[in-house]
Image (cartoon, rainbow, N blue to C red):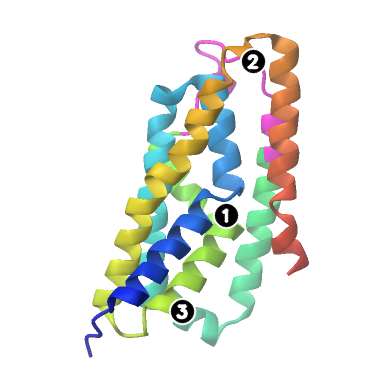
């Protein structure tokens, strides 16, 4: 059965998408670090990967993964802790990164595909996707699932872009190697801090 989303529900969805996308989290901390280290232009593929990758994730969660979690609850815990472990590793990499050097492995921002794939190990992304589909996309309603995915994609891109722009704005100030090290350590710490609600929950 197709359920048409009324205006109040749509407004609630847009507000939910904006608040959950603009608030600090792993994606935003990494995009701010990327904007500061590589500039906005080189960070655009990362931004697109987050927005489109998360939109796809929301769609797939709405179509079938909720049922999988109902059948095998342990799968959600496995994904959660694998994501936590991966982000601890990423925080370590960010903390150790220095000024980008051409041709160096550490001198490249996330690609589109890397950013899209990252959504599947990001605990905040899982929480957002599960919450959005459960609240705004009744099971079996593909039109609602598609609408939720579209809204998140459209809202997510400018939201995450704000963090990349903020990072780039700090770029000149961070030209000093010492300041950049302090910034990267701070971003790594904030990335780890963003995991606390997931670990404590």
**Stretch in magenta:** 91-110
Q: Secondary structure at mark 2?
A: helix
Looking at the figure, which quarter contains the C terminus?
bottom right
Q: Which residue is mark 2?
A: 174
Q: Is residue 170 above or below residue 85?
A: above
How many labels were placed on the picture?
3
Mark nearer the N terminus (1 vs 3): 1
Q: What residue appears at the point 31 percent right and 85 percent down from the top-left corner?
A: 140
Q: Is residue 106 magenta?
A: yes
Residue 105, labelled with which disc? none
Residue 174, image quadrant: top right
Q: Is residue 188 magenta?
A: no
- 152 to the left or right of 103: left
Task: Give the CA separation, mark 2 to mark 1.
Answer: 27 Å
Q: Which residue is mark 3?
A: 134
- Report crowding for label 1: few under 14, some 14 to 19, many 20 or more residues within 10 A (C-alpha): many
Mark nearer the N terminus (3 vs 2): 3
Residue 167 locus on image (x, y percent):
55, 27
Q: Secondary structure at mark 1?
A: loop
Q: Which residue is mark 1?
A: 122
Q: Secondary structure at mark 3?
A: helix
């Amino acid at each position: 059965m197709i359920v048409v989303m009324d205006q109040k529900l749509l407004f609630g969805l847009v507000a939910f998408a904006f608040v959950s996308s603009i608030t600090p989290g792993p994606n935003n901390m990494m995009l701010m670090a990327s904007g500061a280290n590589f500039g906005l232009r080189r960070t655009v593929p990362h931004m697109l990967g987050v927005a489109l990758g998360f939109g796809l994730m929301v769609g797939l969660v709405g179509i079938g993964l909720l049922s999988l979690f109902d059948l095998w609850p342990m799968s959600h815990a496995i994904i959660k802790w694998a994501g936590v472990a991966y982000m601890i590793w990423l925080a370590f990499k960010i903390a150790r990164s220095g000024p980008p050097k051409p041709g160096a492995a550490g001198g490249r921002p996330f690609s589109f595909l890397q950013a899209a794939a990252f959504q599947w190990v990001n605990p905040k992304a899982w929480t957002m996707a599960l919450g959005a589909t459960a609240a705004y996309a009744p099971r079996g309603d593909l039109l609602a699932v598609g609408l939720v995915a579209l809204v998140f994609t459209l809202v997510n891109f400018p939201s995450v872009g704000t963090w990349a722009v903020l990072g780039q704005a700090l770029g000149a100030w961070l030209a000093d190697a010492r300041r950049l090290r302090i910034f990267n350590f701070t971003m790594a710490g904030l990335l780890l801090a963003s995991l606390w609600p997931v670990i404590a929950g």
